[in-house]
Image (tube, rainbow, N blue to C red):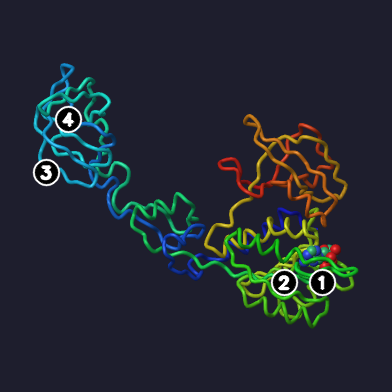
């Protein structure tokens, strides 16, 4: 059976074949760009700062006028932010200036107002000297006009939105969000607003998958549930193939009514793998019809969730123009003991914390792959590698985080 690593390599290989320049793009207003991915490089439209900018409220001066101290200077004017200086500063003079205002010609420094005392008759006493250039950010000292600010394929977070505003990008070209069809299968499923009858359960996967798709930047399209018949599966899978990506949940194990793979083959969807040596999530199917990816995810809710994180999320990234990249893996010390008898790579619910600079991984108790409630307290999965049958207290281990810890994660296990 394929290892997790080998299965991911097959998926990542497919992701590399998705070329950003072949993806559809759209133009959105700046406020709607948060969370999207840039489909154009963005350059600076002016020098930053665009003029010699005062960084303090104070007085624009010639620094060599400040010897001896206190220096008495004639205050000859005032410049507010948004104004343009109207006179050149001469020796023996000071001009009052506010933070963000352009420094006048002739001035080479700004003295903070806290280090001055205003005197009668428009004079000011400067109590401390400042070096040449103090408190003035020269034009272009941060960035130069024309410089690349953000390359194509930048994910737009809060700071990026601010950066785009600063360079006047009122409208932004981004990659279109991929549409992802979600098809839950199973005769036993009822929808969330229905009371399950004998032998029935609620279709939770359609909702968790839909939320996972949205949180990874896709647009979920939940299809009507298919019962376990060839005919219903055929019809709904065909519908799902209209989207950029299709996720089928359930019907991929070895049971008599697990018919999804049979329908895949019938519809010309080529199966690239149908099992991965992992727990939970063993019966994960990755398939393709031409360039389009289709996943068959195991029906058990925890398995579905884990298989999505490992195999679906890189495809969703690639379909948005991002590099499929690596997993959010951190290395820490295990608190507690884990015995793993499955002979597969185990990914078990865990609480990962940063405690005085050390990462601690606390395995949480769970009752198997149907036990979705055990995930509620987890922020990651502790990895018990294939070759390892147990993890002992204080032993080093990898944990796959659901959300990245800034600067801490980003590798494979
Ligand atoms: P299957 O992979 O179809 O054999 O399903 C495995 C287990 O997952 C069974 O106990 C199913 O009842 C359960 N299951 C399948 N689909 C869903 C779903 N959409 N929501 C919640 N549980 C499901
Ligand atoms: Mg089923």
Marks 3/4: CA–CA distance:
15 Å
Looking at the picture, how far across and down is residue 305, in whole percent? Answer: 72, 57
Q: Which comes sooner in the sequence, label 3 or label 1?
A: 3
Q: Which mark is residue 61?
A: 4
Closer to the camera, 83 or 211?
83
Q: Residue 179 vs residue 139: left or right?
A: right
Q: Residues within 10 Å of mark 3 (few under 14, many from 20)?
A: few
Q: Residues within 10 Å of mark 4 (few under 14, many from 20)?
A: many
Marks 2/3: CA–CA distance:
69 Å
Q: Secondary structure at mark 3?
A: loop
Is ligand 2 closer than 8 angstroms to the Cβ of mark 1?
A: yes
Q: Residue 215 vs residue 40: left or right?
A: right
Where is mark 2, residue-wise? 183
Where is mark 3, residue-wise? 86
Q: Quadrant of ligand 1?
A: bottom right
Looking at the picture, how far across and down is residue 60, in whole percent? Answer: 19, 33
Instruction: Give residue 80's quadrant in the image.
Output: top left
Q: Which mark is residue 186?
A: 1
Viewer-nearest of discs 3 and 1: 3
State yes or no: discs 3 and 4 in contact (Cβ < 8 Å).
Answer: no
Q: Secondary structure at mark 1?
A: loop
- Which residue lies at the image location 62% right of the left edge and 46% below the top edge? 411
Q: Secondary structure at mark 2?
A: strand
Toward the front, the furthest residue is 120
């Amino acid at each position: 059976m394929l290892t997790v690593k080998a299965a991911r390599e097959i998926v990542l290989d497919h992701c590399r074949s998705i070329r950003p320049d072949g993806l559809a793009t759209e133009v959105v207003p700046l406020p709607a760009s948060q969370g999207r991915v840039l489909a154009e490089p963005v350059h600076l439209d002016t020098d930053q700062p665009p003029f010699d900018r005062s960084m303090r409220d104070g007085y624009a001066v010639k620094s060599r006028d400040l010897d001896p101290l206190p220096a008495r200077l004639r205050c000859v004017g005032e410049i507010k932010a948004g104004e343009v200086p109207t006179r050149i500063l001469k020796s023996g003079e000071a001009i009052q200036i506010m933070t963000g205002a352009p420094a006048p010609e002739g001035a080479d420094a700004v003295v903070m107002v806290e280090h001055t005392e205003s005197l009668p008759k428009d004079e000011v006493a400067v109590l401390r000297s400042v070096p040449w250039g103090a408190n003035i950010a020269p034009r272009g000292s941060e960035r130069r006009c024309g410089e690349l600010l953000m390359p194509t394929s930048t994910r737009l977070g809060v700071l990026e939105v601010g950066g785009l505003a600063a360079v006047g990008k009122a409208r932004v070209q981004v990659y279109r969000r991929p549409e992802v069809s979600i098809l839950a299968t199973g005769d036993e499923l009822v929808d969330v607003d229905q009371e399950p009858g004998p032998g029935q359960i609620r279709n939770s996967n359609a909702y968790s998958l839909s939320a996972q798709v949205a949180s990874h930047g896709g647009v979920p399209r939940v299809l009507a549930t298919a019962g376990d018949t060839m005919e219903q599966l055929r019809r709904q899978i065909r519908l799902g193939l209209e989207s950029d990506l299709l996720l089928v949940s359930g019907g991929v194990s070895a049971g008599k009514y697990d018919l999804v793979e049979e329908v895949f083959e019938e519809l010309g969807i080529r199966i690239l793998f149908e099992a991965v040596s992992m727990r939970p999530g063993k019966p994960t199917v990755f398939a393709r019809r031409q360039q389009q990816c289709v996943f068959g995810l195991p029906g058990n809710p925890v398995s579905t969730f884990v298989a999505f994180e490992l195999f679906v999320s890189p495809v969703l990234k690639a379909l948005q123009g991002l590099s499929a990249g690596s997993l959010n893996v951190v290395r820490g010390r295990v608190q507690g003991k884990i015995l793993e008898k499955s002979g597969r790579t185990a990914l078990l619910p865990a609480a990962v914390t940063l405690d005085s600079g050390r990462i601690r991984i606390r395995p949480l108790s769970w009752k198997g792959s149907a036990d979705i409630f055990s995930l509620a307290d987890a922020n990651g999965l502790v990895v018990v590698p294939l070759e390892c049958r147990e993890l002992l207290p204080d032993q080093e281990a990898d944990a796959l985080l659901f959300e990245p810890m800034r600067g801490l994660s980003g590798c494979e296990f």
